[in-house]
Image (cartoon, rainbow, N blue to C red):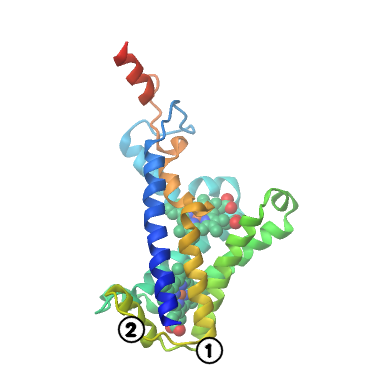
Amino acid sequence: MSALFAILFYVATLLLVVGLLYRIRTYAGTPAPLKIPTTPAPTTTGGVVLRMTREVVFFESLFKANLWTWGLGWLFHASLVLVLLRHLRYFTEPVWGWVAFIQPFGIYAGITMLFGLCGLWARRLFVERIRYISTPSDHLMLLLLIAIAASGLMMQFVAHTDVIAVKGYFQGLMHLSVQPLPADAILVLHLLSVVILMAIFPVSKLLHAPGVFFSPTRNQKDDPREKRHIAAWAKQLESEN
Ligand code: HEM
Ligand code: HEM
């Protein structure tokens, strides 16, 4: 099983990295022919950076749109960040000071992450307007993340796994050597869900993470009166004529 997971993690990492690079290249090369910042919009580059930061860190536009979804969504995402930072301890040796410091907060973040996810799923199940527009992938993505969070918390509170051995295993993988992985069912479930998450990331709605930075309604300046907007392909036509 240790060898099988080694193959799974190498393949999933490759898919994640290559897939994401490919997607980002496509996004970066897609022309934005029109000036369409959602107004009121900033008129300077500094302003755009500030707006994007508010969007990514606080989900500003979702806050204005729906408080409940914002609350649950923000709770989930902020908790996810803490949880992922807490996991850095498996991949670093010696563990950095600040990673050691956030360990206890990371555990609570696991709980709030699961709470946020369940709330978001309940919204898709019970709010009729949202249920109508939800696709199977919307449900499955939430279920996958719920499986990851629930199995992680089970290891924390119900059936411990040998975290030292887990760390040894991943340190080994980073140096291309396969160490023994504890054969606990919950750990296997946790890691299998993580492998699936990594592999499908570049072909799923999770692309909203890199995608938000390429959104023309958010990353453009509101300056069409000061500066004529010409799409890249139109510029090329102009120079050919
Ligand atoms: C730059 C980073 C990210 C930003 C700014 C961001 C922002 C958002 C926003 C604004 C929503 C909309 C909530 C809604 O209207 O329903 C959302 C949904 C979602 N995000 Fe992210 N996200 C980021 C990264 C991630 C990552 C890394 C994951 C998972 C690994 C993730 C998982 C999800 C999921 C599953 C949903 C759908 C929730 C639902 O079904 O209601 N996000 N995200
Ligand atoms: C290769 C990657 C990963 C490994 C080796 C791993 C391993 C573990 C282990 C061993 C635990 C139990 C911690 C303990 O008992 O002290 C745990 C907990 C947890 N994991 Fe993971 N995990 C990985 C990826 C992820 C990812 C990508 C997520 C989120 C999307 C996640 C979410 C959680 C949560 C919410 C907990 C419970 C709270 C906590 O202990 O931090 N894990 N993980």
Question: Which residue occupies the foreground of this view, 187 or 217?
Answer: 187
Question: Which residue occupies the foreground of this view, 233 or 159?
Answer: 233
Nearer the camera: disc 1 or disc 2: 2
- Which residue position holds label 1? 159
- Seen at 41% across and 41% down, the residue is 27
- Seen at 69% across and 51% down, the residue is 130
Q: Residue 102, image x and y in percent?
A: 36, 75
Q: Residue 132, image x and y in percent?
A: 73, 49
Instruction: Locate residue 95 relative to residue 65 in the image: left or right.
Output: left
- Which residue position holds label 2? 168
Q: Which quarter of the frame holds ligand 2?
A: bottom left
Res 87 visible: yes
Q: Amino acid at mark 1?
A: Ala
Q: Residue 8, image x and y in percent?
A: 44, 70
Question: Which residue occupies the foreground of this view, 133 or 103?
Answer: 133
Q: Amino acid at mark 2?
A: Gly
Crowd tier of the residue under label 2, counting other residues whose Cα lies within 10 Å: few below 14, some 14–19, many 20 or above? some
- Seen at 39% across and 64% down, the residue is 13
Q: Quadrant of residue 121?
A: bottom right
Q: Is residue 189 above or below residue 143?
A: below
Question: Which residue occupies the foreground of this view, 46 or 3?
Answer: 3
Instruction: Locate residue 170 relative to residue 187 in the image: left or right.
Output: left
